[in-house]
Image: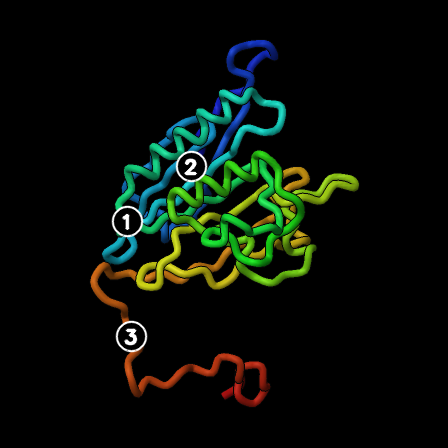
Amino acid sequence: FWWAGEEKVAKGHKNEGRGGAGILMRMEMAKDVVEVQRVSSRILVVKMVLGERLMEVVSVYTPQVGRPKIEKEKFWETMEECIGKVSEEELWVIGGDLNGHVGKERKGFEEVMGIHGYGERNEAGVSILEFCQGNKLKIANTMFKKKDEHKVTYKSGGAETQVDYMLVRVSKDKMSVRNCKVIPGEECVTQHRLLCSDLDFVMSNTKRYKSKKGVRKIKQWKLKEDIVREE
């Protein structure tokens, strides 16, 4: 587990424990991590080697409604600096609480949004879309047809919104998104629900790996049959 943030101290102090971003990874994958960057208390970058490719996994927590405008602008400027240092050959995934609503409407942002958005867009949502547009990222949440219950990432009382997102750099020869949805019964932190995304990526920089011809697929589902399982 890697974490970036501020320790909580007395209210009114310069440091009030705001922000905080973390990444939890399986031990067998952690051995592939080559660098950890605690960019700020709201941005954590873990760089890992997958085959012949580098992948940047970024955990973020955008300043929420009510925070000063200059703080929000600084956050997006820092994000621009981070992604500006990344080669186009690298895989790039951002996940976290972006504290904005991108909504359903796609006009002007068709290249970064799918047709399955949720709710109404707000000013913070525009910032998310503009960041994606400028950096060739797609919002995975909007790419798949799901029930509203599988789109809502934040639920409190009567409020149901989508503020947590997965942003990915999609490319046919590098990485594609297979699925993205909320698991309704799983709460990450208070009121926030677990958002999951399945990604397919090519391990090699030069070519795709093709499955070998003549190799039979193991029919795992057959193990449900008592006789087969016993054999």
Relative to 123, residue 140 above or below: below
**Which amino acid type is shown beneath numbered disc 1?**
Glu
**Secondary structure type for disc 1:** loop
Q: Earlier in the sequence, mark 2 or mark 1?
A: 2
The image shows residue 226 at horizontal and vertical percentages of 59, 86
The image shows residue 191 at horizontal and vertical percentages of 68, 40
**Which amino acid type is shown beneath numbered disc 2?**
Trp
Indicate the quadrant containing the N terminus: top left, top right, bottom left or bottom right. top left
Q: Which residue: 51% across, 53% down?
A: 113
Q: Nearer the viewer, residue 224 or 22?
A: 22
The image shows residue 223 at horizontal and vertical percentages of 53, 82
**Secondary structure type for disc 2:** strand
- Relative horizontal placement of residue 133, taking residue 99 as reference (left or right): left
Q: Nearer the viewer, residue 181 or 68?
A: 68
Mark 3 vs mark 1, CA separation in Å = 23 Å
- Relative horizontal placement of residue 124, taking residue 155 as reference (left or right): left
Q: Earlier in the sequence, mark 3 or mark 1?
A: 1
Q: Nearer the viewer, residue 60 or 20?
A: 60
**Which amino acid type is shown beneath numbered disc 3?**
Lys
Q: Nearer the viewer, residue 126 or 81?
A: 126
Mark on residue 88?
1
Mark on residue 210?
3
Q: Nearer the viewer, mark 3 or mark 1?
A: 1
* Residue most extreme to the right: 158
The image shows residue 22 at horizontal and vertical percentages of 47, 37
Mark on residue 105?
none
Q: Are marks 2 and 1 in contact (CB under 8 Å)?
A: no
Disc 2 marks which residue?
Answer: 2
Q: Which residue: 43% across, 45% down?
A: 133
